[in-house]
RNA sequence: GCCCGGGUGGCGGAAUGGCAGACGCAGGGGACUUAAAAUCCCCGGGAGCAAUCUCCGUGUGGGUUCGAGUCCCACCCCGGGCACCA
């Protein structure tokens, strides 16, 4: 028998079906389809060179969802593209002399071919690369619209720069005071005029919007909530002593402690620090202190353990309620970017202020008494930060601190000295990068007219791709006269282009919308956005919880307010998958550890190599079976062979029986089935139920595949009739198809089907096959398993109880005892309570 | 320090408050083979010679319940986020 010997050879099968699907445009999302839409999106890759296993996992998850939805009757939009601007392209240019554009586009070609070999069901007709002017020109237009609305603005800022990157970083790109790419390199401060997007304008909306994102993991929502960091409190204006009409403004969450203020703290960056000391004997010490602190490593400075330091500025201000005069210090522990960059210090009720006051001998004034009372300024060992009753606070004395917060804020408001205020931790988004490989910022600097937007008709400002990086990888744009030398659109005089480019997180903030109109040349979006958006299921790594996912939410809301789109939230559902880990031998300790697969650590497994070995289907199966999506996945060569073994078993099993299977019509009803036929028929329907539920409702692909293993195991047992076996095999192929699309198509065709599984309707379980006439119940005595009884499904509670008590295995445990109670859980168990 | 997740066989992992360990990997035994690979069959939490029997068992200690891996309280450990944010 020639057929029995035909081996499972994934390479030819996979190529055949990939070509077939492409020829038939199987994955093209049709605009005019009457089916309900489903937008499935995975975070698009940075074209770093080759696809890695983290991508494979991410995209395998997305593909199962997309393929299942397609089979379940949805018109699925499942696009892919390239997050193609960014630093690695420049790094490659530095180290290998290849132009970023060339490097990027070559990588895209390589990676596209790799993705195609994995058989993902992408609509390749919608592919976009963010480095194409046809893409970023719309980003430039939106930037100009944001500028017009005041949502983009220019500000002199002390920025974090990375000496290795040679560029300014966003706050979000600073991780523990280190560059996010060079995690052992502290950032250094640099003063410069740069562009910001006003994310803070949407702080409240972004926070409130989280409540509606019920299909997001709670962990991500919590992280974003904390990132936005809303605080209720008050603004307090302390009048300067000797500078009439001027104030030191602070934000505090504890206005109830206002009567306990004994000094003021300014951040080192605060302009008042130098101003107040100017011309006094404090001028020199303040200047020295400020310069030293600003030079200091931000990470160390921000650490809670760092010793609190400060210098008196020479200035005083007045407590707006108590009237007391308090000295103004500049200190190393106030964060300039938060609130007003100045803090009212209440040593008795804030540990940081207490620590500082101790070192500098500043007074401590208790103004909150805890419920047990007895706090005195002299005996205080640590700040009391809890709630209590206001004390030594004029007319507020005796007021509970919570009421006092409102009362003090209201009084401040009535005096014109501040009032209730809400502050957010979220900062505006600095988007200027002193890099070459990015989207040019479309503004012109004119000495006469100032900032002048590039007129819409002149867009796009094309990034010249014939320039080479300068020494140390510096951007050639500021040195390219051809690029920067322009005449001012307003006055016609000589002017200069902005030579910065945008943070690449800008491109990834709106790509999900552009996929709905990827080739549109007259606008950024059209009515198709309303048809497809929002993304129903977004899939990617949790590391983007606070950067990309907040930026994209901000951008969507901004695009809404600019009239480009009608929705508020870009991603209705979010699934965050874990990392792919591999063993790594630590050379110093000699021990083996599981760490993220990474090129730099030399523990990567190349997807292509795996595909050559066991086929794309087996690689996908392994990725989905080995762990639930949100867990980290530990790579295992044995595991991948197991996945391959499963597919081979189905291949061989089905082909051995092929003649018999094709001679029968698949069974369609439970009617008249018994024995092995009934068992197999039931198992197939059980699998339909399980797999459907696991994929659709739980995103538990590992248990879905386990259910398919169970069905295959029952199929291994002989005895069932050809019609039932055919039904079971076909069910297995249909349910397995989203996971292993190629081999299932091939076997489906061999069974004589003319249609493709890609479009095959998803089956639904026959309710009659999910229940049975008889059911086995567990019998417990005092909660311990003692026996099993089989009863009719329709048996009454009394009948079940009688059967359980009569069971021979149960009897010995009842002897000499009295039955106190019998708990009957229908369909599950009986628990006999004896004493 | 604060806020989330988690701790289940040798390993990855299953288990609407109801048979702990589904499914798989590795392992052991056997078949086939000159041999190996591949494949197939059997075993598999621990202990009690062995068992279809008994006891113990889901990080630790308590509690609720007829019944707890699952719920509650305290603690230990691991992972992640935030962290001088006033």
Image: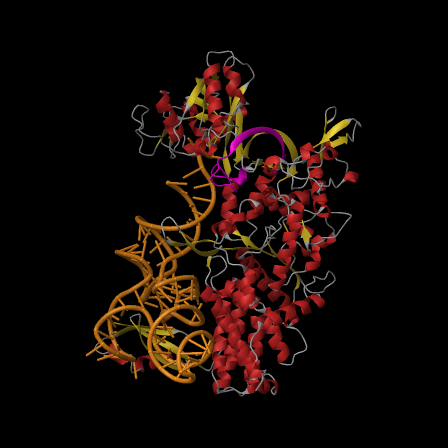
How was this image coloured?
Answer: secondary structure
Position of residue A758 in the picture relative to residue A343 (left or right): right
Residue A657, compared with residue A98, is above or below; it is below
The quarter of the picture where the C terminus of chain A appears is bottom left
Place residue A669 in its image quadrant. bottom right
Q: How many marks?
A: 0
Q: x%, y% of residue A473? A: 60, 38
The quarter of the picture where the N terminus of chain A appears is bottom right
Q: x%, y% of residue A87? A: 59, 43
In-front residue for pair A247/A400? A247
Q: x%, y% of residue A507? A: 64, 45
In-front residue for pair A429/A59? A59
Residue A695 can be seen in this image: no
Q: x%, y% of residue A739? A: 56, 67
In-front residue for pair A472/A702? A472
The residue lying at 65 percent from left, 33 percent from top is: A153
Residue A93 can be seen in this image: yes
A140 within the magenta span? no
In-front residue for pair B47/A437? A437
Residue A330, compared with residue A187, is above or below; it is above
A196 within the magenta span? yes
- What stretch of residues is rendered in magenta? A171-198
Residue A487, compared with residue A646, is above or below; it is above
Residue A107, compared with residue B50, is above or below; it is above
The residue lying at 51 percent from left, 62 percent from top is: A623
């Amino acid at each position: 028998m020639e057929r029995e010997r035909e081996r499972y050879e994934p390479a030819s099968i996979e190529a055949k079906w990939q070509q077939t699907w492409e020829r038939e445009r199987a994955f093209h999302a049709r605009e005019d389809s009457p089916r309900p839409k489903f937008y499935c999106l995975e975070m698009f890759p940075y074209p770093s060179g080759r696809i890695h296993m983290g991508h494979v996992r991410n995209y395998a998850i997305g593909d199962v969802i997309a393929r299942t939805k397609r089979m379940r009757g949805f018109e699925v939009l499942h696009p892919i593209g390239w997050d193609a601007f960014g630093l690695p392209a420049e790094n490659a240019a530095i180290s290998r002399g290849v132009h970023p554009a060339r490097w990027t586009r070559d990588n895209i070609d390589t990676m596209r071919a790799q993705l195609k070999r994995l058989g993902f069901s992408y609509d390749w007709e919608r592919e976009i690369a963010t480095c194409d002017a046809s893409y970023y020109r719309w980003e430039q237009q939106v930037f100009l619209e944001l500028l017009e609305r005041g949502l983009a603005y220019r500000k002199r800022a002390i920025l974090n720069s990375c000496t290795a990157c040679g560029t300014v970083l966003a706050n979000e790109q600073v991780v523990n005071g280190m560059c996010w790419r060079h995690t052992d390199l502290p950032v250094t401060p640099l003063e410069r005029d740069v562009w910001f997007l006003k994310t803070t304008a949407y702080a409240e909306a972004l926070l409130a919007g989280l409540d509606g994102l019920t299909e997001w993991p709670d962990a991500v929502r919590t992280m974003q909530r904390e990132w936005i960091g809303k605080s209720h409190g008050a603004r307090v204006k302390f009048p300067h002593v000797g500078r009439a009409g001027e104030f030191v403004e602070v934000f505090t969450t504890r206005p109830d402690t206002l009567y306990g203020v004994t000094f003021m703290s300014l951040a080192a960056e605060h302009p008042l620090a130098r101003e107040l000391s100017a011309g006094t004997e404090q001028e020199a010490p303040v200047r020295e202190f400020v310069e030293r602190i600003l030079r200091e490593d931000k990470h160390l400075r921000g650490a809670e353990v760092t010793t609190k330091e400060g210098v008196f500025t020479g200035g005083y201000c007045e407590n707006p309620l108590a009237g007391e005069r308090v000295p103004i210090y500049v200190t190393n522990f106030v964060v300039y970017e938060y609130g007003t960059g100045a803090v009212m210090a209440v040593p008795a009720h804030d540990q940081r202020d207490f620590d500082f006051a101790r070192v500098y001998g500043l007074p401590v004034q208790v103004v909150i008494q805890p419920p047990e009372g007895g706090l005195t300024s002299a005996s205080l060992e640590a700040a009391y930060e809890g709630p209590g009753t206001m004390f030594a606070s004029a007319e507020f004395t005796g007021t509970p601190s919570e009421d006092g917060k409102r009362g003090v804020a209201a009084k401040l408001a009535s005096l014109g000295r501040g009032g209730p205020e809400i502050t957010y931790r979220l900062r505006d988004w600095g988007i200027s990068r002193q890099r070459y490989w990015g989207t040019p910022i479309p503004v012109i600097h004119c000495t006469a007219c100032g900032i002048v937007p590039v007129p819409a008709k002149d867009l796009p400002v094309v990034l010249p791709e014939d320039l080479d990086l300068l020494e140390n990888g510096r951007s050639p744009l500021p040195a390219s006269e051809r690029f920067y030398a322009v005449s001012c659109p307003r006055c016609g005089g000589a002017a200069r282009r902005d030579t910065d480019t945008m943070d690449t997180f800008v491109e990834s903030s709106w790509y999900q919308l552009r996929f709905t109109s990827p080739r549109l040349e007259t606008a950024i979006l059209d009515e198709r956005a309303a048809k497809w958006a929002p993304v129903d299921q977004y899939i990617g790594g949790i590391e983007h919880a606070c950067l990309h996912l907040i930026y994209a939410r901000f951008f969507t809301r901004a695009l809404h307010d600019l009239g480009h789109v009608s929705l508020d939230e870009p991603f209705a559902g979010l699934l965050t998958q874990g990392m792919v880990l591999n063993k790594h031998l630590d050379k110093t300790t000699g021990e083996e550890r599981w760490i993220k697969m990474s090129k730099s650590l030399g523990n990567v497994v190349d997807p292509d190599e795996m595909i050559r070995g066991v086929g794309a289907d087996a690689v996908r199966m392994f990725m989905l079976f080995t762990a639930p999506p949100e867990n980290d996945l530990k790579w295992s060569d044995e595991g991948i062979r197991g996945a391959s073994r499963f597919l081979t078993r189905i291949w061989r099993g089905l082909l051995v029986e092929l003649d018999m299977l094709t001679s029968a019509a698949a069974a369609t009803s439970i009617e008249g089935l018994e024995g092995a036929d009934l068992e197999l028929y039931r198992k197939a329907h059980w699998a339909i139920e399980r797999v459907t539920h696991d994929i659709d409702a739980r995103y538990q692909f590992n248990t879905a595949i386990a259910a398919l293993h169970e069905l295959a195991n029952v199929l291994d047992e002989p005895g069932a009739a050809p019609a039932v076996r055919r039904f079971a095999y076909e069910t297995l192929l249909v349910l397995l198809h989203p996971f292993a699309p190629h081999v299932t198509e091939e076997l489906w065709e061999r069974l004589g089907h003319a249609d493709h599984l890609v479009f095959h309707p998803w089956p639904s379980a026959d309710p009659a096959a999910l229940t049975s006439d008889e059911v086995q119940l567990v019998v417990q005595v005092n909660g311990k398993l003692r026996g099993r009884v089989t009863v009719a499904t329709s048996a009454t509670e009394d009948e079940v109880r009688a059967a359980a008590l009569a069971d021979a295995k149960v009897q010995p445990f009842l002897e000499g005892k009295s039955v106190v109670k019998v708990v009957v859980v229908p369909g599950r168990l009986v628990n006999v309570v004896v004493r």
